[in-house]
Amino acid sequence: MTIQRMDNVGIVVEDLDAAVAFFIELGMELQGSRMQIEEDWAAKVVGLEGMHSEIAMMAIPGAPGRLELTKYHTPEPVTPTPAVPPANTMGVHRVMFAVDDIEDTLARLRPHGGELIGEVSRFEDSFLLCYLRGPSGIIIGLAEQLG
């Protein structure tokens, strides 16, 4: 038995509108429309009785894989402690995106809540790399290939 593909990465957000706008500015597209999820099968899958959420599926045009942004209405989402955990916190660390121009991408994401973590660094003569924090504390990585 083998894995066929990675279908999506799920991220819980506080403000779905802000998260969708952030990832659209990054260059992703909203696939279809946002969906309300509150059926019994979904509550059983996530193990949250009485669950009601709203999701938005984001995709890179012409590329495989998606981000599923989820806003929980009930039960209320749990804020980690500390609310903005450091990069070495156990669990999902970040999602990395390859970009054409890292400085331009940073400039476009700042008005949407993007905050640089650390600084843009050069890895040998291959890449410019950085992490930034977006809405709801989401950490993304950006990589610009050099040469």
Image (cartoon, helix red, strand yellow):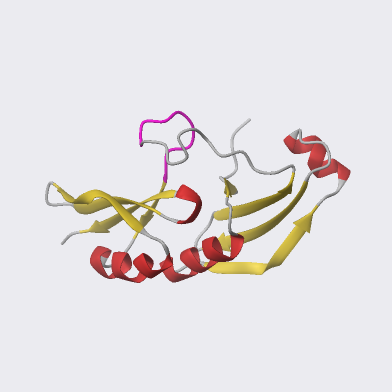
Q: Residue shown at 21%/51% (left/top)?
A: 119
Q: Whole-percent x and y of residue 94?
A: 42, 44
Q: Is residue 70 left or right of residue 19?
A: right
Expressed as whole percent of the image width and height from the top left, the position of residue 67 reads: 56, 54
Q: Residue furthest left?
A: 125
- What's the residue at 64%, 60% (across, down)? 56
Is residue 90 highlighted in magenta? yes
Residue 146 % position (x, y)? 18, 59
Bounds of the magenta span?
A: 87-94
Examine the rendering and report whether any part of residue 43 can be seen.
yes
Q: How many marks?
A: 0
**Residue 49 occupies which quadrant of the picture?**
top right
Left or right: residue 74 versus residue 102 is right
Residue 99 position within the rendered picture, expressed as x and y whole percent measured from the top left: 32, 63
* Secondary structure, magenta segment, majority class: loop
Q: Is residue 87 above or below residue 129?
A: above
Seen in the picture, residue 25 relative to 133 is either above or below; the reply is below
Residue located 73% across and 37% down the image: 46
Q: Is residue 2 left or right of residue 72?
A: left
The answer to whether residue 61 is visible is no
Of the 4 image quadrants, the one containing the N terminus is top right
In the current view of this chain or complex, which residue is farthest to the right? Answer: 40
Q: Nearer the viewer, residue 27 or 1?
A: 27
For the C terminus, the quadrant is bottom left
Viewer-side residue, 9 vs 1: 9
Depth check: give the residue in front, 31 or 37: 37
Residue in the picture at 37% in, 60% down: 114
Q: Is 2 contained in the magenta span? A: no
